[in-house]
Amino acid sequence: MNPIELSDRIWRFAARVAKVVDALPDTRTGRHVAGQLIRCGTAAGPNYDEGRVAESKADFAHKINIALKEMAETEGWLKFIVIAELLRKKKMAGLIEECCELCRILNASVATTKGRRS
């Protein structure tokens, strides 16, 4: 997968997260989770894209690592939605799987850039 394809994949993931946010119940917990999830779930795309045009290898690694951190936080909130029974596990499974896969891809990219194994 080339960098443009990965960027598109991350943005499509963010759009799916936005739909989950809109589907959360209008309860105190639902609103809190929605606020957290919309921030972290849409943050990886801009950070990854900024990393793609980084000024140095270190800057690239830093931006991609930020994207990874946001994706990891997103994974946590998606799991919480299932645990708290805010939405059905069946509805969330594919999104959680995609999140985990994107985390692995971003982690490998950071590891390669820093010259270490993932």
Image (cartoon, rainbow, N blue to C red):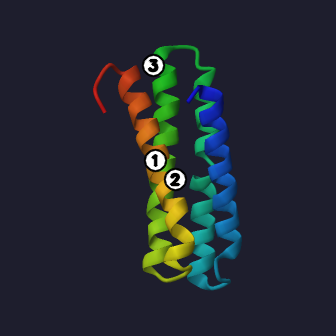
**Residue 118 placement (x, y as % from top left):** 31, 33
Kind of residue at disc 3: Ala
> How far apart in space, not on screen, are marks 1 and 3 (Cα)?
24 Å
Does the image show residue 2?
A: yes
CA neighbours of label 2 inside 10 A, class few (<14), some (14 to 19), many (20+): some
The furthest residue to the top: 56
Residues under numbered marks 2 and 3 in contact, where contact means CB atoms less than 8 Å apart: no
Residues under numbered marks 2 and 1 in contact, where contact means CB atoms less than 8 Å apart: yes
Q: Give the residue drawn at x 41%, y 21%.
A: 113
Looking at the image, is mark 2 or mark 3 earlier in the sequence?
A: 3
> How far apart in space, not on screen, are marks 2 and 3 (Cα)?
27 Å
Kind of residue at disc 1: Glu
Along the horizontal axis of the image, is 25 left or right of 108? right
Q: Give the residue drawn at x 58%, y 62%.
A: 37
Residue indicated by mark 3: 58
| Relative vertical location of residue 47 with respect to residue 36 in this rendering, above or below | above
Disc 2 vs disc 3: which is toward the camera? 2
> How far apart in space, not on screen, are marks 2 and 1 (Cα)?
5 Å
Residue indicated by mark 2: 98
Rendered image quadrant of residue 11? top right
Identify the element where label 3 is drawn.
helix
Q: Give the residue drawn at x 68%, y 83%.
A: 26
Rendered image quadrant of residue 36? bottom right
Residue indicated by mark 1: 101
